[in-house]
Image (cartoon, rainbow, N blue to C red):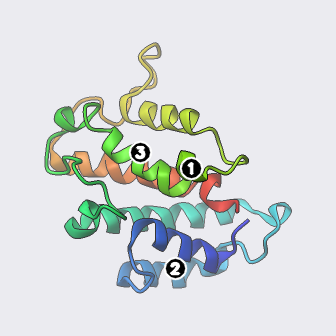
């Protein structure tokens, strides 16, 4: 399990957002004591998960809000229509968002670690977060109801934060 400094460095590497980004750095300084200090799953607390979620949301927001980072082939999502409305972006282009995130957090087929969560299962969960579950009207997706380009980016931030804040990133 990663410690607080390792979590911060990992999120920075995955997103390309520098740890010195003013918003990220200020929040990290505030929540640092709420992040894991030892590499022991038995010592993991709910406050650790909340701090990881908060930091993941900030890193994803910084990535998606920066037009240079979000289109960079290494850290971003080339081709994803961030300036399109929700109906145009999802589900038609969602693989351009989901697949790079999976590559960075879980690894590619060439470097997949056997103890990581199943890639197809994680992808299905992220797709259901976006589009909902067709057979369950009580679980509409984030894209349900449409929206403008701001909503498209908000959904992208949510998908990013869901994966970055998960155990797949935390467990090493």
Q: Where is residue 14? Give x, y as percent.
A: 47, 65
- Residue of label 1: 110
Of residues 76 and 153, the one drawn nearer to the viewer in this rendering: 76
Task: Give the alpha-carbon distance from disc 1 to disc 3, as whole Å.
Answer: 14 Å
Q: Which residue was labeled with disc 3?
A: 99
131 is higher (above) or lower (below) than 112: above
Q: Name the residue rendered at 49%, 57% in the picture.
A: 104
Horizontal and vertical percent position of residue 133: 45, 22
Counting from the top left corner in percent of width and height, residue 6 is at: 63, 76
Whole-number angstrom distance, CA of label 2 to CA of label 3: 27 Å
Res 166 label: none
The residue at 81%/61% (across/down) is: 41
Q: Residue furthest front?
A: 110
Which residue was labeled with disc 2?
Answer: 28
Label 2: few (<14), some or many (≥20) within 10 Å? many
Q: Earlier in the sequence, mark 2 or mark 3?
A: 2
Local crowd at mark 1 within 10 Å, few (<14), some, or many (≥20)? few
Q: Is there a contact, CB below 8 Å, between mark 2 and mark 3?
A: no
Instruction: Tell me if 77 is positioned left or right of 10 in this view.
Output: left
Q: Image point 53% across, 56% down: which residue?
A: 105
Kindly indicate the quadrant of the structure image that contains residue 16.
bottom left
x then y, percent, for residue 31 = 57, 77
């Amino acid at each position: 399990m990663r410690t607080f400094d390792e979590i911060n460095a990992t999120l920075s590497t995955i997103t390309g957002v520098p740890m010195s980004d003013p918003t990220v750095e200020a929040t990290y300084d505030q929540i640092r004591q709420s992040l894991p200090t030892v590499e022991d799953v038995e010592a993991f607390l709910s406050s650790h998960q909340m701090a990881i979620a908060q930091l993941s949301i900030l890193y994803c927001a910084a990535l998606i809000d920066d037009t240079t980072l979000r289109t960079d082939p290494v850290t971003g999502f080339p081709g994803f229509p961030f300036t399109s409305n929700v109906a145009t972006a999802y589900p038609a282009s969602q693989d351009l968002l989901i697949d790079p995130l999976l590559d960075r957090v879980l690894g590619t087929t060439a470097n997949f670690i056997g103890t990581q969560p199943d890639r197809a299962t994680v992808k299905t969960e992220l797709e259901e977060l976006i589009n909902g579950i067709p057979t369950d009207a009580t679980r509409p997706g984030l894209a349900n109801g449409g929206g403008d380009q701001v909503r498209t980016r908000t959904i992208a931030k949510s998908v990013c934060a869901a994966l970055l804040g998960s155990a797949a990133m935390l467990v090493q």
